[in-house]
Amino acid sequence: MTTKVPAGRTSSPVPGFGSLILWLLGAVLAFLALFLVITFVLRQMPDPIGPRASLFVQGAQMTVQLTVVAGLIGLVVGVIAGIMKTSETLFVRAPASFFIWLIRGTPLLVQILFVYNALPPLLQSAGIKLELNEFWSAVIALALNVGAYNAEVIRAGIQAIPRGQTEAARSLGLSGAQTMRTVVLPQALRVVVPPLVNNLVALLKDSSLASSIALLELTLAGSRVSSESFQPIPVLTTVAVVYLALTTVMTLFTDQMEKRVKIATR
């Protein structure tokens, strides 16, 4: 049996699960190759870089780990908060609005310090015992921060979908949750891929603030080498070049994702 496509409409390929797996595998292999190249190049450099090349690589790996983990959690937070922000019910919309207002109105550095130093004692006073190390403190703060910005992006994407599609889905018997999950949200996420990608690249650079709680990421690695060698110029230049290499590889693969999404929506 063959399926006919109505006149005036064309079927478009949608990136499937296999395509996504290949994209993720390519990104992982690219970063592994990048770390090998960074290690090789830095080891060829004179003091103070060459003898401490492994420290820079360790810091770069931690930076990528922070970005990936916080980025994934931040995407989930953004989707939930963005959907809540579009709700017509005040009790659903108000908590999301307050969360976004609070996070966007305070510096990320303060948020990281608050999660690391103040959150465990506050939870303990409420009877919740929670011990956070430097990594998870940074992840929580970064995820909440990028999640608030993602929420505004996703809210705008949801509101960009024509209201007639929602009304048509409801007229077919779909509930509000089903309409959002199967009709509105998939289209909205495709629309907002470019700004979400920008937030992810910004998150990679913002992860440098995790050095404030002594997490050994790229910035703190450079700071330690600079303090030991008293040669800030070559050290900071190296740190900047490594950040540039990381963002370049990340942008390369996120651009490919954007192209796939554009093809699928034609």
Image: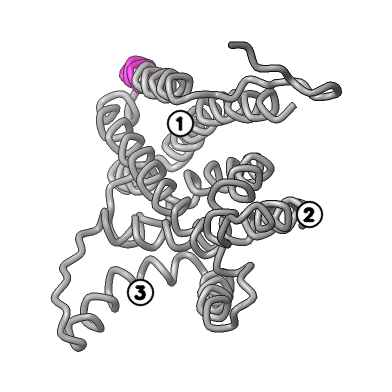
Query: Of label 2 and label 1, which has the lower sequence position?
Result: 2
Residue 177 x %, y %:
53, 60
Mark 1 residue element: helix
| Mark 3 burial class by Cα count in 10 Å: few <14, some 14-19, many 20+ | some
Query: Of label 3 and label 2, which has the lower sequence position?
Result: 3
Q: Along the line of sight, which residue is nearer the eye, 2 or 195?
A: 2
- The kind of residue on which mark 3 rests is Phe
User: In this rendering, which labeled residue sits more in front, label 1 or label 3?
Assistant: 3
Residue position for label 2: 164
State which region is magenta. 35-43
Q: Along the line of sight, which residue is nearer the eye, 45 or 122?
A: 122
Left or right placement of residue 149 versus residue 243 in this view = right
Residue 212 x %, y %:
35, 61
Residue 73 x %, y %:
39, 52
Mark 2 residue element: helix
Residue position for label 1: 242
Mark 3 residue element: helix
- The kind of residue on which mark 1 rests is Val
Residue position for label 3: 114
